[in-house]
Image (tube, grey):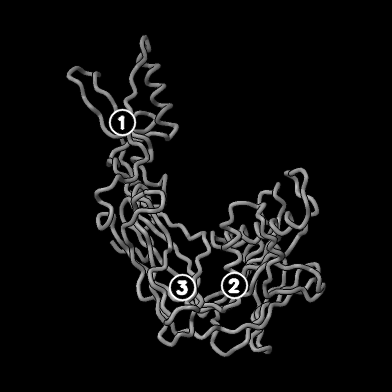
Amino acid sequence: MLNNHNHTYHKAILYLLSCCLLLSSCVEEFDVETEDFESILVVNATITNELKRQEVLLTRTFRFEENGPAAEQGAIVKIIEDETTTIPFDEIFPGSYESIIPFTVVPNKNYQLSIETVEGRVYLSKIVQLPPVTSNIERVFPMRMTNNDGVEGVGLFVDSFDETGSSKFYRYQFEETYKIVARFWVPVDLTPSLEFVERSENQRICFNNRVSEDILITDTNTLNEDRVSGFFLRFIQAEDIRVSERYSILVRQFVQSQEANGFYQTLSNFSQSESLFSQVQPGFISGNITSQTNPNERVLGFFNVASVKEERIFFDREEFLNDLPRFSPGCDRIIPRPNTGETPESFDRRLRELIRTGSIKFLEEIRGNEPGSGVLVFVPRPCGDCTVFGSSAVPDFWVD
């Protein structure tokens, strides 16, 4: 599926291309509409030593005034192994291609990506091999810290080591999953017809997950040993919903070639640049995919062959952040009352309509001394229904 990794990859590619086009000429007046637009094929392809259906994503660059990239549909995509074995790919949804069979890349074999578009344009990558890999993730660990803005929270870090010194170039992705508890969930609900019913247990505890969006790379090329020590992955402030209860992170470590590392380093530099109008003239980023139909055609992207190691950890908020302010969606109590001169019938209609909007959840009924003198107490829906923030489905890997 097209995920945030791919969105970030394309965003960085587009950003870089925009820099190149804008800096290639003097501009007297900025125009929101894109001039001299060039539709360029964007390739996002990393195949790994995991046994799975490998994925290739194909899109086209888009104008600033457009909403997003256009999928490159109907292409013939295949991986060629050792110039003899061909592994075809199917288009599972627009622009996303998966190998028709699961396969894994292995050392000492040559791999090449081949793409043919519906217009008959043919693209080939350079022949690449799986880098020598013996590096393992030693640990992923959280640490309470204060960021550069003075905000307290928890940082996530990774250690890795290759005693043979052959890995050297690393890229990281992560997927974080977190537990959400509706702190004002009660087992009773109130319907728009003002009837008390049992509230679903599914609204009490939920889960959500997010994938990393940044390009996270490092290398040990200038170090005495091939050791990654305390590489910073991300910071989560104490009042973030992600660390309101229990948190898990799955870290994926890619060992890749020096050429791939340089490509991602360039993407990272441009995605973090503060201005399109930089003083630096970058030129066009060099990938490893070229057009066989037109040698002058520009292609954006990289065919990457990498090894992957994974490590998952869990931790509870109480282990690091228990004394700091916790995430709150704003849970002030809501007590609807009749307006001056409002009839009971009119008030009931107004109350029913308020419940019908779904913006509030019943909390309790405070009964008065006289019949009919009690009040109904509500809270904003996020305080009593966790499905505002996630799904009640428990992930298969989750451990409490």
The quadrant of the picture occupied by the C terminus is: bottom left
Amino acid under disc 3: Gln
Q: Is residue 120 above or below residue 191?
A: below
Q: Position of residue 298 (x, y in %)?
A: 75, 67
Residue at the spot 40% in from the left edge and 85% down from the top edge: 163
Q: Which residue in the structure is indicated by mark 2?
A: 262
Amino acid under disc 2: Gly
Circle 1: element type? loop
Residue at the spot 56% in from the left edge and 79% down from the top edge: 257
Q: Position of residue 248 (x, y in %)?
A: 36, 61
Residue 267 in view = yes
Specify few, some or many for label 2: CA neighbours under 10 Å numbering under 14, 14-19, or 20 or more: some
Mark earlier in primary sequence (3, 2): 3
Q: CA distance from mark 1 to mark 3?
A: 46 Å
Specify few, some or many for label 1: CA neighbours under 10 Å numbering under 14, 14-19, or 20 or more: some
Residue at the spot 36% in from the left edge and 76% down from the top edge: 138
Q: Nearer the viewer, mark 1 or mark 2?
A: 2
Between 195 and 274, the residue placed more toward the observer is 274
Specify few, some or many for label 3: CA neighbours under 10 Å numbering under 14, 14-19, or 20 or more: many
Q: CA distance from mark 1 to mark 2?
A: 55 Å
Mark earlier in primary sequence (1, 3): 3
Q: Nearer the viewer, mark 3 or mark 2?
A: 2
* Image mark for residue 214: none
Between 225 and 263, the residue placed more toward the observer is 225
Between 123 and 357, the residue placed more toward the observer is 123
Q: Is residue 191 above or below residue 180?
A: above
- From this viewpoint, which residue is outermost toward the left? 369
Tags 1 and 3 touching, CB below 8 Å: no
Q: Which residue in the structure is indicated by mark 1?
A: 333
Q: Position of residue 396 (x, y in %)?
A: 38, 65
Q: Which residue in the structure is indicated by mark 3?
A: 253
Amino acid under disc 1: Arg
